[in-house]
Image: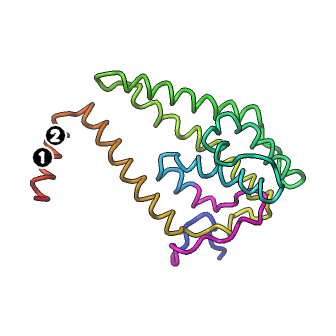
Amino acid sequence: MESNLYQAPDSEIITPESDTSGLALYVVAPWKFNLLFWATLGIYDVYWNFRNWQNQKDIRQKKVQPVARALFSVFFFGSLVKTINGESEGKAKPLPVTTMATLYILSYLISTVSDRAAANMETFGILDLISLALLPVTWAVLFKAQKAINLSQGDEHGLLNNRLTLANGIWILLGISLWALILLGLASGYFPEQTDSFLSSLIETVS
């Protein structure tokens, strides 16, 4: 029976990352992409953009600044989708550039505005949940782009980058810690008494 290539491998999870630097775009297995995106609350988006632009710079000799384009991806995402379509020509259905760029930009802008507004509020409210609620939108856009990237590089299942590295593991642990802090913050805002009781019990157990 054929194995499911979208599932994580059973063994040898932590290994050196396969060399994908010779490819025009950043190939990664779907399961690994999903794990890193969600474990890091979408922060993986920055690295993902960086690697794609870095590969373009190295292989296609494009005069771009990968770090700047990653940090300010909201201004360059449409260009990246167009680049993916150029690499995918004849190999995959073209991505809807306007739709994907619009969703990506709106998700970023709404999240940024809501986070800043929530930071100025003394009590928890719906604004504290907007960024988390929009994560699936960003994920859907990036995952669609990743599938097209894999096809364009002749590696649909991302087998060249199908293992977790030590660096990946560290980021996952940091991401889990961030998730815990966010959930704890939300709990203390909506259920202060129960949260205080839980933390007190936890401290007593540890000490």
- How would you classify the magenta stretch by its main secondary structure? loop
Amino acid type for the residue under numbered disc 2: Asp
Percent position of residue 60, x then y: 84, 55
Asked if the magenta segment contains residue 29, the reply would be yes
Q: In the image, is residue 129 above or below residue 163?
A: above
Percent position of residue 195, x then y: 20, 40
Give the residue at mark 2.
Answer: 196
Residue with the most extreme right position: 90
Percent position of residue 169, x then y: 46, 64
Amino acid type for the residue under numbered disc 1: Ser
Q: Is label 2 in a helix, a strand or a loop?
A: helix
Measured Cα–Cα span from mark 2 to mark 1: 6 Å
Asked if the magenta segment contains residue 86, the reply would be no
Q: Is label 1 in a helix, a strand or a loop?
A: helix
Query: For residue 75, which quarter of the picture?
Result: top right
Give the residue at mark 1.
Answer: 200
The answer to which of 178 and 76 lies nearer the viewer is 76
Which quarter of the rendering shows the C terminus?
bottom left
- Labelled disc at residue 68: none
Q: State the residue at coordinates (52%, 39%).
A: 135
- Span colored in magenta: 10-33
Q: State the residue at coordinates (46%, 30%).
A: 130
Q: State the residue at coordinates (67%, 55%).
A: 51
